[in-house]
């Protein structure tokens, strides 16, 4: 298992040879907003990458990456493993002045992976691709009941004193607080319900 996914492009820059890299990763180190981050996978994530020479200092990267990321269930916040099968494809450009690989948008709207060191570390590229192609939200189960809005009880494990009075469906379908119950869908106007105003 590799510490970081690297591909060596020195010979490709000197000739029209292709370059290849493959392996597995259990994590990726990258930066976001100037801060170091780590993306961890639940099992070894296989990658298989080829880079082909185009013209000048440009090349094309293609391949596959199969990470399993951990996300939170949108209703109950349990950890959910999410397997991904990513198809990679991006232009690359060699610029000796680049300190570290980075993505920039070309005039055509395509993203270009710019690099300066022929021994290219693909960690940031793979991390960004993984994050962009991960789903926005997931459920650990389609029937997940979520958490009680008052006490935080995981309703998949049993009801709480609040849910005993109000079925989940009733809370989801009605706005406000069902009459005669203690379970609140809190609104900023709930306290005004019993307020008596002076008559003109």
Image (tube, rainbow, N blue to C red):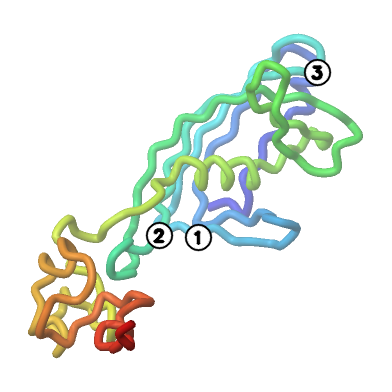
- In this view, 152 is above or below 37: below
Q: CB under 8 Å between callouts 1 and 2?
A: yes
Q: Can you give x and y, in whole percent of width and height, for residue 132 in the image?
A: 51, 42
Q: Which is more N-terminal, label 2 or label 3?
A: 3
Dot 3 alpha-carbon crowd within 10 angstroms: few under 14, some 14 to 19, many 20 or more: few
**Which residue is under mark 1?**
40
Residue 190 image-quadrant placement: bottom left
**What residue do we see at 39% from left, 46% from top?**
135
The local secondary structure at tag 1 comes to: strand
**Residue 177 left/right relative to 2:** left
Q: CB under 8 Å between callouts 3 and 2?
A: no
**What residue do we see at 26% from left, 57% from top?**
139
Find the residue positioned furthest to the top. 55
Q: Which is more N-terminal, label 2 or label 1?
A: 1
**What residue do we see at 24% from left, 83% from top?**
153
Q: Nearer the viewer, mark 3 or mark 2?
A: 2
Quadrant of image for the C terminus: bottom left
Camera-nearest residue between 100 and 192: 192
Camera-nearest residue between 97 and 108: 108
Q: Can you give x and y, in whole percent of width and height, for residue 4 in the image?
A: 63, 50
* Residue 57 disc label: 3
- In this view, 85 is above or below 4: above
* Residue 3 disc label: none
CA distance separating discs 1 and 3 = 33 Å
Q: Nearer the viewer, mark 1 or mark 2?
A: 2
Find the residue positioned furthest to the right. 97
* Residue 70 disc label: 2
Q: Which is more N-terminal, label 3 or label 1?
A: 1
Q: Can you give x and y, in whole percent of width and height, for residue 118 in the image?
A: 79, 33
Camera-nearest residue between 18 and 99: 99
Camera-nearest residue between 164 and 158: 164
């Amino acid at each position: 298992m590799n510490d970081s996914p690297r591909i060596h492009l020195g010979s490709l820059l000197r000739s029209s040879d292709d370059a290849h890299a493959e392996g597995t990763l259990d994590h990726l180190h990258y930066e976001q907003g100037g801060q170091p981050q780590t993306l961890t996978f639940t099992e070894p994530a296989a990658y298989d990458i080829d880079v082909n020479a185009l013209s000048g200092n440009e090349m094309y990267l293609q391949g596959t990456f199969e990470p399993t990321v951990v996300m939170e269930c949108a209703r109950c916040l349990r950890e959910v493993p999410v397997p991904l099968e990513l198809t990679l494809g991006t232009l690359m450009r060699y610029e000796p002045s680049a300190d570290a690989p980075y993505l920039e948008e070309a005039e055509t709207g395509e993203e270009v992976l710019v690099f300066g060191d022929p021994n290219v570390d693909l960690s940031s590229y793979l991390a960004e691709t993984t994050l962009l192609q991960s789903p926005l939200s997931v459920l650990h189960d389609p029937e997940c009941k979520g958490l009680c809005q008052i006490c935080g009880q995981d309703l998949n494990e049993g009801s709480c004193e609040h849910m005993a009075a109000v079925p989940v469906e009733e809370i989801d379908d009605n706005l406000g607080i069902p009459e005669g119950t203690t379970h609140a869908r809190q609104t900023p106007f709930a306290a005004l319900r019993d307020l008596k105003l002076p008559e003109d």
